[in-house]
Structure formats: structure tokens, C-alpha cells
């Protein structure tokens, strides 16, 4: 990834984060994040929780949420390590790509929080 593409991508990501806090686009994004969380987090989490309970491992919903948050933090940590390692090797294009991946991983929860709050404020 060239430096120009990297900077443009960061600017567009910053604009998306800023728009997620506004009433209309943020409310719509909050609705889409809620749908995505339902289908891609809640349903598999409930299935995993039921499978663990049937196996004799008592698991609460809060424990599953913390486990998923830890897994997400692990993804961000791996992306940071990749970016640092590639930066130290002098592979600037690959380091920018890994840095953008890290930035996206860090921006998504912020966008979800801002847009969900915007959706709650805009709800009639």
C-alpha cells in the first residue's frame, strides 16, 4: 500500500467514525451494527454457551462476552505485532497495510458504540 493510499484510507476511516456519531448515518449504522452483532455474535455465542453447558461447563453470558472481547483484543494485538515487525524490517508497504488493519480493528468498536448511541438518541 502506497503512502498516498494509506493517508486517504485513514482520512476516510476518520470520516466514517465521525459520521457514526451523527443522527441519521449514525443511527442507520447503529441499526446495522445491532443486526450484525445479533447474527454474528449473539447466535454463535448462544450456541457455544449451550454446547458448553451440555458438556458440564457452567458458562454465563457475561463470561462469553468477556471471552469474545479477549479474542478481539488478541486480533488487535496480533495486528499491532505484525505492523511493528514489518516496520522494523523496513517493509513499508506491508507495514502500512498491517497498520491500517490495526486502525480498523480499533475503530470498529468505537464506531459501534457511537452509532448505537446515535441510534438510541434518534429513536422516536
Image (tube, rainbow, N blue to C red):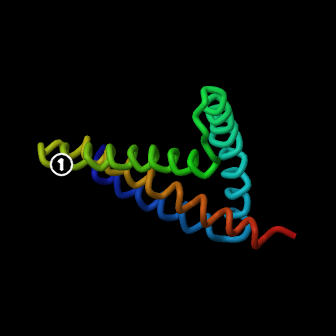
Q: Which residue is at a point 60% across and 26% down the rendered structure image? A: 55
Q: Position of residue 13 (x, y in %)?
A: 48, 58
Element type at marker 1? helix
Whether residue 123 can be seen here: yes
Answer left or right for 98 relative to 15.
left
Residue at far front of view:
56
Task: Name the residue nearer the viewer: 38 or 25.
Answer: 38
Viewport quadrant of the N terminus: top left
Q: In which quarter of the image is residue 113?
A: bottom right
Viewport quadrant of the C terminus: bottom right
Residue at far right of view:
124
Answer left or right for 86 relative to 113.
left
Q: Is residue 116 above or below residue 1?
A: below
Q: Where is residue 73 in the image (x, y as percent from the top left)?
A: 42, 50
Q: In this view, does 81 lie above or below 30?
A: above
Mark 1 is surrounded, within 10 Å at the Cα level, by few (under 14), some (14 to 19) or many (20 or more) other residues, namely some
Task: Name the residue nearer the viewer: 36 or 63.
Answer: 63
Q: Which residue is at a point 66% across and 27% down the rendered structure image? A: 54
Q: Position of residue 115 (x, y in %)?
A: 65, 63
Q: Which residue is at a point 60% across and 52% down the rendered structure image? A: 62
Q: Where is residue 99 in the image (x, y as percent from the top left)?
A: 32, 50
Task: Name the residue nearer the viewer: 108 or 51.
Answer: 51
Q: In which quarter of the image is residue 52?
A: top right
Answer left or right for 6 relative to 86.
right
Residue with the mark numbered 1: 87
Q: Which residue is at a point 33% across and 49% down the rendered structure image? A: 77
Amino acid at each position: 500500500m502506497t503512502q498516498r493510499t494509506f493517508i486517504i484510507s485513514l482520512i476516510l476511516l476518520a470520516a466514517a467514525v465521525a459520521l457514526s456519531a451523527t443522527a441519521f448515518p449514525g443511527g442507520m449504522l447503529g441499526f446495522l451494527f445491532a443486526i450484525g452483532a445479533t447474527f454474528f455474535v449473539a447466535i454463535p455465542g448462544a450456541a457455544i454457551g449451550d454446547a458448553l453447558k451440555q458438556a458440564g461447563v457452567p458458562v454465563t453470558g457475561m463470561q462469553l462476552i468477556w471471552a469474545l472481547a479477549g479474542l478481539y483484543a488478541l486480533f488487535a494485538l496480533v495486528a499491532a505485532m505484525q505492523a511493528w515487525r514489518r516496520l522494523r524490517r523496513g517493509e513499508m508497504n506491508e507495514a502500512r497495510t498491517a497498520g491500517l488493519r490495526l486502525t480498523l480493528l480499533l475503530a470498529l468498536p468505537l464506531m459501534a458504540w457511537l452509532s448505537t448511541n446515535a441510534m438510541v438518541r434518534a429513536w422516536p
